[in-house]
Amino acid sequence: MSVKAKVEAVIYATEEPVTLNQLASLLKDEVLAALRAYETAPENDAPENTQEEAGDVEKRELKQVKDHLTGILEELTTQYASSDHGVEIRQIAGGYRMGTKPEHHDAVVGFAKSLKPPVRLSLPALETLAVIAYKQPVTVPEISEIRGVDTSGVIATLLDRKLITTAGRKQVIGRPILYKTTKEFLLRFGLDNVSELPSMEEFEKLGDPQAGLFPLRTEDAPPPQAASPGSDEEAVPSPDSHDSGDGA
């Protein structure tokens, strides 16, 4: 991937304006490698730098990186300014951010109003939905056994949100109802099928304190509390409720 493509991707993905210094820090090695690729004169015979000279070299390289990135930013800004594009790159608060063009405001607002409101689920509901997603088809008693609390109340909420549906009855005594996830579940969580769900091994890596992804200080950890069945307290938004920045 070219440096220009990486700059474009970073600006697109960020919600806050990304500054030139941030881009230089992130892409310094890639930019220097690209610049060296254009150089033809060998530098093998150059004398070793003293500590003072090394500092000068670092400053010179940083300036080269920023100059190169500034040129890329100007190219991208000009490219997206074309009428062929519905989005543009703006300089905001000392940084760069991508957003829709003002002339397309009405179209974007009209589309946004047609979207379904974001689904908000309680922690017990999310836990129950996760069990169903990984164990489907599964019965309420099996879900309750895995979670350690009664889950019957939460099932009604998930059915009402059309995130789960019935999948027949299990052929055991009492013939309890089986539940599975729906197409709405896939849409809300951005999945093509349930096989795209993270594996248990991936979850363990994400939760590994040694990985440094989710550091948790013992003194900051809240005391464990038993989740009340069917409770809608501590509502947590589903992934699609994430604000997409300058979309409108």
Image (cartoon, rainbow, N blue to C red):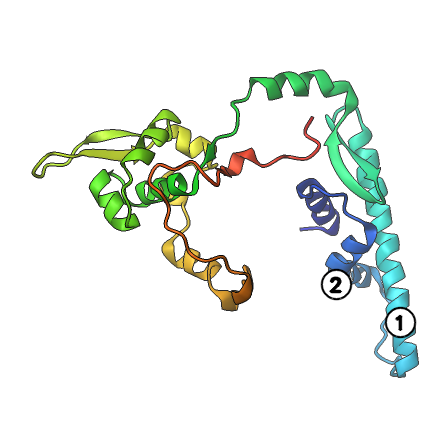
Q: Residues within 10 Å of mark 1 (few under 14, many from 20)?
A: few
List x then y, in percent, for residue 178: 21, 34
In the rendered view, tell whether residue 14 sits above or below residue 208: above
At 71% from the left and 32% from the top, the residue drawn is 246
The number of callouts visible is 2
Which of the labelled discs sits on residue 57, or is there none? Answer: 1
Quadrant of the frame with the C terminus: top right
Q: Could you tell me how far apart the alpha carbons at marks 1 and 2 are, in whole angstroms?
A: 14 Å
Q: Secondary structure at mark 2?
A: helix
- Residue on which disc 2 sits: 29
Quadrant assignment, res 8: top right
Query: Left or right of 205: which side holds 111?
Result: right
List x then y, in percent, for residue 171: 10, 36
In the rendered view, tell whether residue 104 sits above or below residue 136: above
Can residue 182 be seen here?
Answer: no
**Residue type at the position of mark 2:** Asp
Quadrant assignment, res 185: top left
In the rendered view, tell whether residue 5 sits above or below residue 193: below
**Residue type at the position of mark 1:** Val
Q: Secondary structure at mark 1?
A: helix
Query: Left or right of 186: which side holds 20?
Result: right
At 74% from the left and 63% from the top, the residue drawn is 29
List x then y, in percent, for residue 26: 73, 58
Instruction: Mark 1 or mark 2: name the one nearer the start of the chain.
Output: 2
